[in-house]
Amino acid sequence: MNIWFATNNTHKKEELQAVLNTSLKIPSSEGINFAPEETGSHFYENALIKAIELQKLTGGNDPVIADDSGLCVDALNGRPGVLSARYGMESGKKLTSLEQNIMLLDELSSAQDRSARFVCAMVLYFSKDRFFIFQETLEGKIVMKSEMKGDGGFGYDPVFFVPEYGRTLAELSSEEKNKISHRGKAGRLIANVLWQK
């Protein structure tokens, strides 16, 4: 059975493969142009959009896993939220992860409330009449600019402090991150359904 993952992000693919303990196919590795318009106002809506679109592109027979995830910062009223990957794109140019992290830290400035969470909505999509959605979080806080550190992970990981470990997500090993992450938690719930289907 082929299992597709509706992303072109190889970091996400590697993370989810480790959680599911199986190989996944992604569009970019198979020469498929996959760029759905994420118009949902909630993570689960965007995950469904991606799953439905990829299943159409791949013939409609194989199950598709899709996720939408992002960083929600309390002091910013939940932003960047569903726009996490597109944060700072007002000028039309996508920022690098480092630029997004600096922009976030500048926007937060010296705010006392640094609480935040990563949110991941993950869909296991078999057909329009049969699919499963799970949404999980990882609670933490945003560091001050001088505390940004770590070269593991990707995205906002260097600015997200995990109290349980006393380190940023970017300082954790892949195994440590998968154990506690929003994507790891949602992926394990998907795995329970996938292997018992």
Image (tube, rainbow, N blue to C red):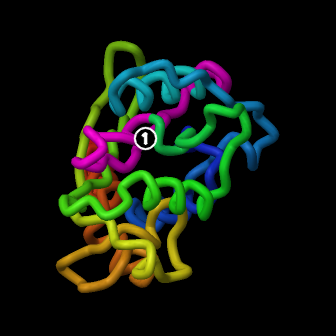
Q: How far across and how far down the image is residue 168, in percent?
A: 36, 77
The front one of 197 and 78 is: 78
Identity, as a three-letter code, of the amino acid under mark 1: Asp
Q: Secondary structure at mark 1?
A: strand
For the magenta stretch, what is the residue range? Answer: 55-82
Left or right: residue 5 versus residue 189 is right
The residue at 33%/46% (across/down) is 120
Dividing the picture into quarters, in which one does residue 147 lie?
Answer: bottom left
Q: Quadrant of the C terminus?
A: top left
Establish if 18 lies above or below 195: below
Residue furthest out toward the top: 129
Q: How far across and how far down the image is residue 25, in percent?
A: 62, 48
Q: How far across and how far down the image is residue 137, in percent?
A: 23, 52
Residue 22 appears in the picture as rendered: no
Which residue is denoted by mark 1 in the rendering? Answer: 67
The front one of 143 and 55 is: 143
The front one of 186 and 62 is: 186
Residue 161 appears in the picture as rendered: yes
Residue 90 in magenta stretch: no
Left or right: residue 30 versus residue 170 is right
Residue furthest out toward the front: 110
Q: How far across and how far down the image is residue 118, in percent?
A: 31, 53
Left or right: residue 51 versus residue 176 is right
The residue at 56%/39% (across/down) is 86
The front one of 17 and 8 is: 8
The residue at 26%/59% (across/down) is 111
Establish if 5 lies above or below 118: above
Residue neighbourhood size for the residue with mark 1, other residues' Cα within 10 Å, grouped as few (<14), some (14–19), many (≥20): many
The residue at 69%/33% (across/down) is 91
Establish if 62 lies above or below 185: above
Dividing the picture into quarters, in which one does residue 40 lie?
Answer: top left
